[in-house]
Image (spheres, helix red, strand yellow):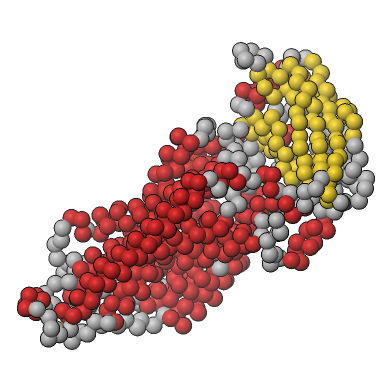
């Protein structure tokens, strides 16, 4: 199939040029990490196990990206001499002097099903360390790496590894490690060389299509509900509030004694804790912008073909969209009469980075204790802090100033009363706490199947590539969230409760609670993860993911509800 349109054409041209080889040119085999198969994030340096290194010492220079450093990529040269289109017959490249300590390390790795990962020309290769016999008494190490490399023209397009040479682990013996390289011509195009790593049967399964269709039907239902029932009710309210002559006697007698118009003097009252509320709304708008841009870039560019490119792209886009955070957060805070705008700007700028960095800092201690490759280097921490202080903060300041000057003046359609109106008693299901708990059910229902595929791609050995599905699910999530929060807010206002700002935000943000609850189910019933490191890593970053999703949904729900509230009170004739 033809490659998708490229927006980074210059970059891709340079990338293709870098991946071209001349005959007999050096091809580097990088050893990355090793770790238990069921704990994908618990990885260690390949040579943390007592493997030996080949004799070759001179290698090409390698630059590590920020995304690779944060994802625990630990590339080390294998020492194997591989040249483009130059076959290597089976040959010994090193020898392991197996004492008791080294044997125990290999036995532990085999018991825990350790796999290792290598790279040739950025193509990943996986192999298993060894295996045990049926009784679990004897353990064997795979000592022979048989590499078959496919080439198309002067580019590498395919790599396959076959592990052979099973040798029993016996203390105080010598184990010879060997390898061979076979080059073969391939018809695979360079642009399609990552297709073999994708799993269409998993991601394009009927249940995936059915979930999208089910969510789409939910959108139609909710939009119809808002349009037919809610709008019809509002028209009736408009008629009654305007005291038109054609109204019946009952409506005329009821007049303005109840309903959402009664709170017109309080509905635009500033929310409680406006500083943190404005910061959350600004952060949510920024997360939505980042999600939208990254998904679009991932749809156009095959980001999964480069190590750490998705994370690097997300960090760059997050930093670049900081003015979005400042604009929406700063303007909302100004409209609510906030005066400590500098404090609000700092909180808005560092709310999400502090949450992510705090979680990463905590998990980093555990990673250091385990000597895992996931331990973030000090230099990388400094780089992330520099991005926060020298990129995110100044851009957030620019957005805040623009927001305060362009849309920071309150222009409410109704005048705010000096004295707050008392909130009457109402039925229990109209209480904000109940509305908040129920508000996230439908948004979660529209995305939970997609959550399974996203979780599996991150926590298991799957590469997520169906970003068209993700974009569609994001659009469906936005529509469902806005519709649900509008309905919840209308019921709340009709009960003469004007505390709709936090209620609309939290009712949409409660989706995160259900996502986090689902993550518990996924951990215990869909995975075989174990150990302190993997458990803390999983639940720590799932908490970050769920919180960010909740903030985004809350901001979307509030923005949609705010437009709805402004619209209905603009159309009401107020004496």
- Left or right relative to 447: residue 41: right
Report the residue at 74% width, 54% height from top: 191
Q: Position of residue 116 (x, y in %)?
A: 69, 34
Specify the farthest residue to the right.
24
- Left or right relative to 552: residue 376: right
Report the residue at 89% width, 44% height from top: 84
Q: Quadrant of the C terminus?
A: bottom left
Q: Is residue 495 above or below residue 369?
A: below
Q: Quadrant of the N terminus?
A: bottom right
Q: Is residue 350 above or below residue 118?
A: below
Which residue is more in the foreground, 377 or 512? 512
Which residue is more in the foreground, 133 or 103? 133
Tell me if I can see residue 528 in this picture: yes
- Left or right relative to 487: residue 168: right
Which residue is more in the foreground, 513 or 526? 526
Q: Is residue 266 above or below residue 471?
A: below
Q: Position of residue 240 (x, y in %)?
A: 15, 79
Q: Position of residue 112 (x, y in %)?
A: 60, 26
Q: Position of residue 237 (x, y in %)?
A: 19, 76
Q: Is residue 392 above or below residue 104?
A: below
Number of numbered discs overlaid on the protein picture: 0
Report the residue at 86% width, 51% height from top: 153
Tell me if I can see residue 382 in this picture: no
Report the residue at 43% width, 81% height from top: 407
Please tell me in which quadrant of the rendered image residue 145 appears.
Answer: top right
Please tell me in which quadrant of the rendered image residue 201 appears.
Answer: top right
């Amino acid at each position: 199939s033809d490659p998708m349109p490229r927006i980074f054409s210059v970059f891709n041209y340079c990338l293709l040029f870098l991946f071209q080889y001349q005959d007999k040119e050096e091809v580097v085999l990088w050893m990355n990490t090793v770790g238990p198969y069921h704990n994908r994030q618990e990885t260690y340096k390949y040579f943390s196990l007592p493997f030996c290194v080949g004799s070759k010492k001179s290698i090409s220079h390698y630059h590590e990206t920020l995304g690779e450093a944060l994802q625990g990529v630990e590339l080390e040269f294998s020492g194997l001499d591989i040249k483009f289109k130059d076959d290597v017959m089976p040959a010994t490249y090193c020898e392991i002097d197996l004492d008791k300590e080294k044997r125990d390390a290999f036995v532990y790795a085999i018991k825990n099903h350790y796999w290792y990962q290598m790279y040739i020309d950025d193509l990943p290769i996986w192999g298993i360390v060894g295996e045990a016999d049926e009784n679990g008494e004897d353990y064997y190490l795979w000592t022979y790496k048989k590499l078959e490399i496919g080439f198309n023209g002067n580019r590498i397009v395919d790599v396959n590894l076959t592990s052979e040479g099973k040798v029993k682990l016996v203390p105080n013996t010598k184990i010879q490690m060997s390898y061979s390289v076979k080059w073969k011509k391939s018809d695979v195009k360079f642009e399609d060389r990552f297709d073999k790593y994708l799993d269409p049967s998993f991601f394009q399964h009927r249940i995936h299509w059915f979930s999208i269709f089910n969510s789409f039907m939910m959108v139609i239902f909710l939009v119809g509900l808002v349009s037919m029932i809610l709008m019809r009710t509002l028209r009736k309210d408009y008629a009654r509030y305007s005291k038109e002559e054609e109204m019946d006697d009952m409506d005329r007698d009821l007049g303005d004694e109840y309903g959402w118009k009664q709170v017109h003097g309080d509905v635009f009252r500033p929310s409680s804790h406006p500083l943190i509320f404005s910061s959350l709304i600004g952060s949510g708008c920024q997360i939505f912008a980042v999600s939208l841009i990254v998904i679009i870039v991932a749809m156009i560019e095959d980001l999964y073909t480069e190590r750490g490119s998705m994370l690097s792209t997300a960090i760059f886009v997050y930093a670049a969209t900081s003015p979005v955070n400042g604009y929406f957060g700063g303007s909302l805070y100004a409209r609510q009469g906030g005066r400590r705008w500098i404090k609000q700007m700092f909180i808005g700028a560092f709310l999400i980075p502090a949450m992510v960095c705090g979680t990463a800092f905590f998990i980093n201690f555990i990673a250091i204790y385990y000597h895992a490759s996931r331990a973030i280097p000090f230099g990388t921490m400094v780089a992330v802090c520099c991005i926060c202080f020298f990129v995110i903060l100044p851009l957030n300041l620019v957005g805040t100033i623009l927001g305060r000057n362009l849309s920071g003046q309150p222009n409410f359609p109704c005048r705010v009363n000096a004295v707050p109106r008392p909130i009457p008693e109402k039925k229990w299901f109209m209480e904000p706490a109940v509305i908040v708990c129920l508000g996230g059910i439908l948004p979660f229902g529209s995305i939970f199947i997609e959550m399974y595929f996203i979780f599996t791609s991150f926590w298991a050995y799957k590469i997520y590539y169906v970003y068209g599905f993700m974009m569609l699910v994001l659009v469906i999530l936005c529509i469902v969230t806005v519709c649900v929060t509008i309905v919840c807010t209308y019921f709340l206002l009709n009960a003469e409760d004007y505390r709709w700002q936090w209620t609309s935000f939290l009712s949409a943000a409660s989706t995160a609670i259900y996502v986090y609850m689902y993550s518990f189910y996924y951990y215990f019933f869909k995975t075989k993860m174990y150990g302190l490191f993997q458990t803390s890593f999983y639940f720590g970053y799932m908490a970050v993911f769920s919180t960010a999703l909740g903030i985004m949904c809350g901001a979307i729900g509030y923005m949609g509800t705010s437009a709805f509230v402004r619209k209905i009170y603009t159309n009401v004739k107020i004496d």
